[in-house]
Image: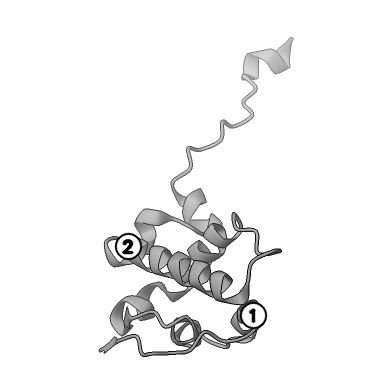
């Protein structure tokens, strides 16, 4: 199942509405971004986390709401595309996945001979 974008009007106070959204589907609909339900069902948290990482670099202080909505839409499309072409395991946006492939920390090793001295 694929959700196609409609002709949604740009809402007032887009950032407030995004914070109030209760699901990934709501965010996609609010920003009028098409999505494949199969992709979203597998990677919804990863997509939203990546979107948050991208949005952290944005400064919305002096933006009009229509420009902010356009930036949010572009960022969501970019985050979604990251996971259309590869799996969440490949992108590793969450700490638990990053730690799963981190090089092991060296153990504090004290040779037995050192203890005898």
> Relative to 94, is 74 on the left or the right?
left
Between the C-alphas of marks 2 and 1, the distance is: 26 Å
- Locate residue 115, reporting x and y percent: 71, 17
For the C terminus, the image quarter is: top right
Identify which residue, 20 or 31, lies in the foreground: 31
Q: Quadrant of residue 110?
A: top right
Q: Residue at x 38, y 68 (%)?
A: 80
What number is the disc on residue 90? Answer: none
Tag count: 2
Identify which residue, 117 or 50, lies in the foreground: 50
Relative to 2, does residue 66 appear above or below in the rendering? above
Q: Residue at x 32, y 62 (%)?
A: 87
Q: Residue at x 34, y 85 (%)?
A: 5
What secondary structure is found at the residue carrying circle 1? Answer: helix
| Residue under numbered circle 1 | 19
Whichever of callouts 2 and 1 sits on the residue coming sooner in the sequence is 1
What secondary structure is found at the residue carrying circle 2? Answer: loop
Identify which residue, 55 or 70, lies in the foreground: 70
The label nearer to you, 2 versus 1, is: 1
Mark 1 surroundings: few (<14), some (14-19) or many (≥20) residues within 10 A? few
What number is the disc on residue 87? Answer: 2
Mark 2 surroundings: few (<14), some (14-19) or many (≥20) residues within 10 A? some
- Locate residue 83, reporting x and y percent: 34, 65
Relative to 20, does residue 75 appear above or below in the rendering? above
- Locate residue 32, reporting x and y percent: 42, 83
Whether label 2 touches label 1, CB < 8 Å:
no
């Amino acid at each position: 199942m694929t959700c196609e974008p409609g002709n949604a009007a740009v809402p007032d106070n887009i950032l407030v509405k995004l914070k109030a959204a209760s699901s990934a589907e709501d965010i996609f609909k609010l920003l009028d971004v098409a999505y494949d339900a199969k992709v979203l069902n597998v990677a919804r948290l990863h997509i939203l986390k990546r979107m948050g990482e991208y949005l952290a670099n944005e400064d919305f202080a002096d933006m009009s709401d229509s420009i902010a909505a356009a930036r949010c839409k572009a960022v969501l499309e970019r985050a979604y595309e990251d996971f259309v072409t590869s799996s969440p395991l490949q992108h590793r946006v969450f700490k638990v996945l990053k730690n799963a492939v981190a090089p092991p920390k060296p153990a504090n090793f004290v040779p037995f001979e050192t203890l005898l001295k």
